[in-house]
Image: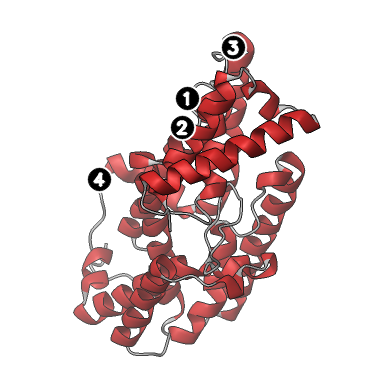
Amino acid sequence: MSGQPSKPSSRIAWIDVGRGVALVAMAVYHFAWDLEFFGYAPPGMTAVGGWKLFARCIASSFLLLVGVGLYLAHSGGIRWSSYWRRLAMIAASATAITLVTWFATPGNYIFFGILHQIAFASVAGLLFLRLPALVTLAVGVAVVLIGNFYATPLLDHPALAWIGLAQTRPRSSDFVPVFPWFGAVLIGMALAALATRAGLFERLRRTTPGAWSRPLAFIGRHSLAFYLIHQLVLISLVWLASQIVEPPPPDRRAAFIHACETTCLGERPQAFCTVYCACVADGMQSQDRLDEAFAPTQSQEFRDMLQENVLVCTQASETSTGGGQ
């Protein structure tokens, strides 16, 4: 070996490893989601608590690395040939996921998931390549904060849901809107610019991780293929297991409460929704009518009973939570 540093365009193995770690973590989360979907795990398990935090950390780290990669690939001049090829692959994959989930789960399909976000960021991120790193960092932080602390009914129209600032959260099994998630990409771009200025990437290029990292680096180098394939493999394995060992009978009360809270949280705070949904579920269960809530159609008598239950529980929940606003 000559001992000369790698060319600036060469891959940095550590970044591939980091991307591989994020993808493996994503596969772990999706496997847990599959177990929940087939009834082996409690309903709503992956949407709350530690699992919800885990999912946010995975998405944040993956999108941050997208920003790092975008800066490293094009900060010295946009390589249009490779750029358009990569963008076309991502956009086509995002479209395919939308179509597949539309037919498979029409009430919960993916219309702006992580691949849609990456496609958007790949275009919008170009506007920040020549800006000072601190400006990009400030905009990224602002996008994150606005996305987490601001919403307006003016953007509640379904056609504007991808922006992420609607008061009513749309239903989707993978929703990664511009606000706040584009902020993670911008932060990644800013950190990459600062790291380049400090010479960090040049030092990383001169070192390579050990043999332990090779599977992770391989996954990181083929991140799109891994993303598209891993869930098909995992869900197929869980389906196969379900043909051998049937999952336990569904907990109708837990499933109802989860569905109720998912809808309620678009309009009311967590404290109110927790009390309200449990109240409605208990009311139906006390009358042995909970199974009817999952039937394809409900009788008028059931709807009247449910409406009466909703009114009672709304009043009780507002009283116990101080108004529920």
Of the numbered discs 1 and 4, the one sitting upstream in the chain is 1
Of the numbered discs 2 and 1, the one sitting upstream in the chain is 2
Residue that mark 1 sits on: 41
**Residue 241 in sight:** yes
Alpha-carbon distance for marks 4 and 2?
30 Å
Q: Are marks 1 and 4 in contact (CB under 8 Å)?
A: no
Provide the secondary structure element on which disc 4 rests.
loop
Residue that mark 3 sits on: 246
Residue that mark 4 sits on: 210
Amino acid type of the residue that numbered disc 1 sits on in the rendered structure: Ala
Amino acid type of the residue that numbered disc 4 sits on in the rendered structure: Gly
Is 124 drawn above or below residue 67 in the view shown? Answer: below
The crowding category of the residue bearing disc 3, from other C-alpha atoms within 10 Å (few below 14, some 14 to 19, many at least 20), is few
Q: Are marks 2 and 1 in contact (CB under 8 Å)?
A: yes
Is 166 drawn above or below residue 265 in the view shown? Answer: below
Residue 191's quadrant in the figure? bottom left
Residue 95 percent location from the top left of the image: 70, 58
Residue 308's quadrant in the figure? top right
Residue 320 percent location from the top left of the image: 37, 44
Of the numbered discs 3 and 4, the one sitting upstream in the chain is 4
Is 22 drawn above or below residue 237 in the view shown? Answer: below
Of the numbered discs 4 and 2, the one sitting upstream in the chain is 2
The crowding category of the residue bearing disc 1, from other C-alpha atoms within 10 Å (few below 14, some 14 to 19, many at least 20), is some
Alpha-carbon distance for marks 3 and 2?
17 Å
At x 50%, y 38%, the residue is 277
Alpha-carbon distance for marks 1 and 4?
37 Å
Provide the secondary structure element on which disc 3 rests.
loop
Name the residue nearer the viewer: 306 or 200.
306
Provide the secondary structure element on which disc 2 rests.
helix
Residue that mark 2 sits on: 32
Q: How many marks?
A: 4
Is 242 drawn above or below residue 184 in the view shown? Answer: above
